[in-house]
Amino acid sequence: MENTGSPQLVELVHTPSGSKFRVWLTEYEINRAKTDQAFLDELTQKYYGFHKKNLVTSIDSFEVGESNAHPETAKLWTFDTTNFLISLVKKYDDEFQSKVKRHVWQKIATIVSDQTKLNVSAQQCDTKWKGLKDMYKNIKQHNEKSGNDAKKWIFFNKMDEFMYKKPEIVPPVTCSSSRGLKINNSATATTSTDVDCEENTTDFNDIENDTPKRTGNLGRKRARYENTVDKRHKDKMQRQDRFLDLFEDLVNTMKNK
C-alpha cells in the first residue's frame, strides 16, 4: 500500500445505520477507497476488525478536516504500531512477571517512540494493551461457546500465540449446566451431573516437566516459576477454594432434589 501525501482525518459513514468512524488516511488511500470497494473493505478490517456493526459499506459521505486532538496522537495506534506493541509485550512478557510493570511499560514506550518518532508515554501503551487484551478475551470466550458464530479480529492470532494460557484469559474454574461435573487436571477429567466445572491445577512441584504444547520453552516456564512462586501458590489456593465452594453448592443442590 502506498503512503503518499500527508495523513488526513477522514470520517467514514456506515450508510445503513448512519454510524460514523474517523481514521487517518493518506490522500492516496482516500482517492482509492472512493472507487475500489475491495480496498475499502480492507481498510475497514484493518481499523475496525470484522465486527458487522462497524463495517463501513461506503465512502460516499466523508469529511476531511482538523481533529480536536493532536494529529500525532490521533494517528499513533495504526495497524503497524499496534502490531509492534503486541510484539514488544510478547518479547518482554517475562519482565512483566518479575519486575515492576511501570518500568517495563516505560521501556516499551521508549522503543515505540523511537520507532514512530512520536512522544509515546508508558500510560498510553498500558491503556492500549488493556484494550487489546479485553478484545482478545471477549472474542476468545465468545468463540468457545457452542452455537456461537465465530468472531474474527485482525490481531487475534498474534495475541493468541502467547496469551492463550494466561490465568487472566483462561478462568481457573468455568461452569455450565449443559454437561456433568468435570474436573480437569491436565489430561485427567471426571464427570457427574448437572454442572460442568473445569479447573486448571498445575502442580508447581512438577513445573519443570510442564512443557507448553505451542512453545516447548521449558527454560521460560522455569524462570517464570522461580520469580512468581508466591503469587502462583496464592492463585492455586484461591482456585481450589472456588472449586470447593462450587462442589459444595452442587452437593447441596442434589440433596434438595
Image: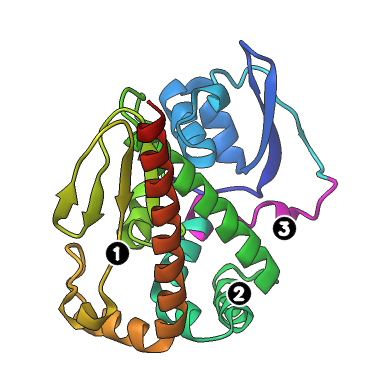
**Residue found 72% across the figure and 58% down from its top:** 73
Mark 2, residue position = 109
**Residue 43 spot, x, y in % from top left:** 50, 35
Vertically, is 65 above or below 213? above
Marks 1, 3: nearer the viewer: 1
Sequence-wise first label, 1 or 3? 3
Magenta part of the protein: which range? 68-81
- Snapshot quadrant of residue 27: top right
Q: Secondary structure at mark 1?
A: loop
**Residue found 69% across the figure and 16% down from its top:** 18
Mark linked to residue 248: none
**Residue 156 spot, x, y in % from top left:** 39, 47
Question: How many angstroms separate mark 2 from mark 3 (CA)?
Answer: 14 Å
Q: Are marks 1 and 3 in contact (CB under 8 Å)?
A: no
Q: Are marks 2 and 3 in contact (CB under 8 Å)?
A: no
Question: How many angstroms separate mark 1 from mark 3 (CA)?
Answer: 43 Å
Q: Are marks 1 and 2 in contact (CB under 8 Å)?
A: no
For badge 2, the amino acid type reads Ala
- Counting labels gives 3
Q: Secondary structure at mark 2?
A: helix
Sequence-wise first label, 2 or 3? 3
For badge 1, the amino acid type reads Thr
Mark 1, residue position = 201
Q: Nearer the viewer, residue 141 or 56?
A: 141
For badge 3, the amino acid type reads Thr
Marks 1, 2: nearer the viewer: 1
Question: How many angstroms separate mark 1 from mark 2 (CA)?
Answer: 35 Å
Marks 2, 3: nearer the viewer: 2
Vertically, is 91 above or below 17? below
Mark 3, residue position = 73
Q: Reply yes or no: does residue 69 show up in magenta.
A: yes
Q: Secondary structure at mark 3?
A: helix
